[in-house]
């Protein structure tokens, strides 16, 4: 495990992460820091714990919205695929019927 120092809202925190994931954790901490700074600009100075709770809630809300939109899009796409599949089956049934009729005439 690697230990690295990240800075959020002007405070340093030492965190552990799997070896090789340091850059990823730094990127994530920069995003949290940016959100914390924007929130501080909007609501003014607040206790670190409260600020981080508010940032976490905002990020969780965004994540839930993304999940909701993704699952809605998936449901819509599955409906389109079902319609396409049904059309393909109908076309295939028509071709089979035509072949059967041709065979009966021969």
Image: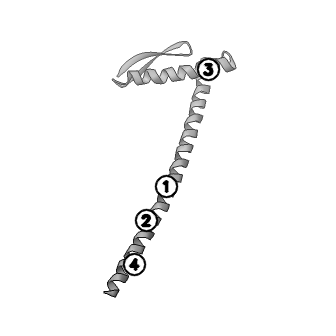
Along the horizontal axis of the image, is 83 left or right of 41? left
Q: Position of residue 8 (x, y in %)?
A: 53, 17
Residue 105: image location, x then y, percent = 34, 87
91 lies above or below 34: below
Looking at the picture, how far across and down is residue 90, in whole percent?
A: 45, 70
Query: Is the C terminus in the top left, top right, bottom left or bottom right quadrant?
Result: bottom left
Q: Residues within 10 Å of mark 2 (few under 14, many from 20)?
A: few
Q: Nearer the viewer, mark 4 or mark 3?
A: 4
Cα separation between marks 1 and 4: 28 Å
Q: Report the front residue among 94 and 41.
A: 94
Q: Which numbered disc, 3 or 2, marks the residue that appears first in the sequence?
A: 3
Q: Please state which of the two labelled residues, at mark 3 or mark 2, is closer to the viewer.
A: 2
Residue at which label 1 appears: 78
Q: Secondary structure at mark 2?
A: helix
Residue 40 locus on image (x, y percent): 64, 18
What residue sits right under mark 2 in the picture? 88
Which residue, given by chain and number where applicable, does mark 3 sit on? 38
Distance from disc 1 to disc 2, alpha carbons, whole Å, reads 15 Å
Drawn side of residue 37 relative to residue 26, left or right: right
Q: CA separation, marks 4 and 3?
A: 66 Å
Q: Earlier in the sequence, mark 1 or mark 4?
A: 1
Residue pointed to by mark 4: 97
Q: Is residue 24 above or below residue 82?
A: above
Q: Give whichever of discs 4 and 3 has the lower sequence position.
A: 3
Which label lies toward us, 3 or 1? 1
Work out how far the residue at label 2 is from the one at label 4, CA to CA, in angstroms: 14 Å
Quadrant location of the N terminus? top left
Please rate how many residues cluster around mark 3, counting C-alpha atoms within 10 Å: few if below 14, some from 14 to 19, many from 20.
some
């Amino acid at each position: 495990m690697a230990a690295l120092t990240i800075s959020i809202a002007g405070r340093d925190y030492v965190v552990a992460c799997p070896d090789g994931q340091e850059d990823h954790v730094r990127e994530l901490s920069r995003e949290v820091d940016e959100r914390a700074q924007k929130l501080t600009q909007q609501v003014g100075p607040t206790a670190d714990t409260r600020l981080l709770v508010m940032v976490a809630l905002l990020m969780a809300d965004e994540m839930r919205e993304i999940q909701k939109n993704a699952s809605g899009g998936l449901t819509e796409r599955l409906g389109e695929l079902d319609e396409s599949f049904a059309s393909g089956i109908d076309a295939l049934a028509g071709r089979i019927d035509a072949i059967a009729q041709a065979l009966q005439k021969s």
